[in-house]
Image (cartoon, rainbow, N blue to C red):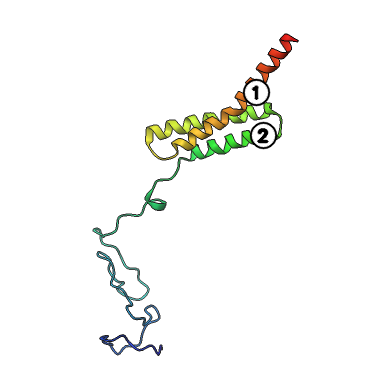
Amino acid sequence: MSNVPPPPGHQSSGLPASPASPQVPGFPYPPPPGVRKPAAAGHVGTVAASSAYPPPTGVGGLSRLNRMAIASLAISFAAYLLSRYTNILVAVPVGAAGAVVGHIARRQIRRAGGRGRFVALAGIVVGWIPAVVLLVVLGLYVSVRGNG
């Protein structure tokens, strides 16, 4: 049992404190509107249908990013890394796949709503970079080769 004196104006019921409700000044706080206390030890309280709190949503109340958009950006970034550290011919198909997934994600977001439009756009742009670089290199090669 705790040796903490009760706060001024507190009336004790004469019963020992239960371990679930420590004797702390101001404890227990009154429950929010629409929430009932448990009927007996071990039972969980229920929430009334007209609770004062809204139903829980995603983190921060926002919906999640489109997974295809995230995949598009990840695949496109992998293609960018492949173009930097390996042969660019390996990176072009991977980048094109990332860009295609980005186009699919943007279509999904446009039709069904949701978040991730700019993530998908970033995946599209980054995905096409290896293909553009390859076209520029081939164009320079052909122009130098043709004039030499």
For image coordinates 63% across by 27% down, the residue present is 92
For image coordinates 48% across by 40% down, the residue present is 67
Q: Which mark is residue 27?
A: none
Q: Name the element at disc 1.
A: helix
Q: Name the element at disc 2.
A: helix
Q: Quadrant of residue 83?
A: top right
Is residue 58 something that shows in the picture?
Answer: yes
Q: Position of residue 46 (x, y in %)?
A: 30, 65
**147 displayed left or right of 46:** right
Total count of labels: 2
Q: Which residue is mark 2?
A: 82
Q: Which residue type carries mark 2?
A: Leu
Please state which of the two labelled residues, at mark 1 or mark 2, is closer to the viewer. Answer: 1
For image coordinates 67% across by 21% down, the residue present is 137
Relative to the observer, which residue lies in front, 17 or 25? 25
Q: Which mark is residue 134?
A: 1
Residue 63 lies, with reference to residue 147, above or below; the image says: below
Relative to the observer, which residue lies in front, 83 or 96? 83
The quarter of the image holding the C terminus is top right
Q: Earlier in the sequence, mark 1 or mark 2?
A: 2
Q: Which residue type carries mark 1?
A: Leu
Q: Quadrant of residue 112?
A: top left
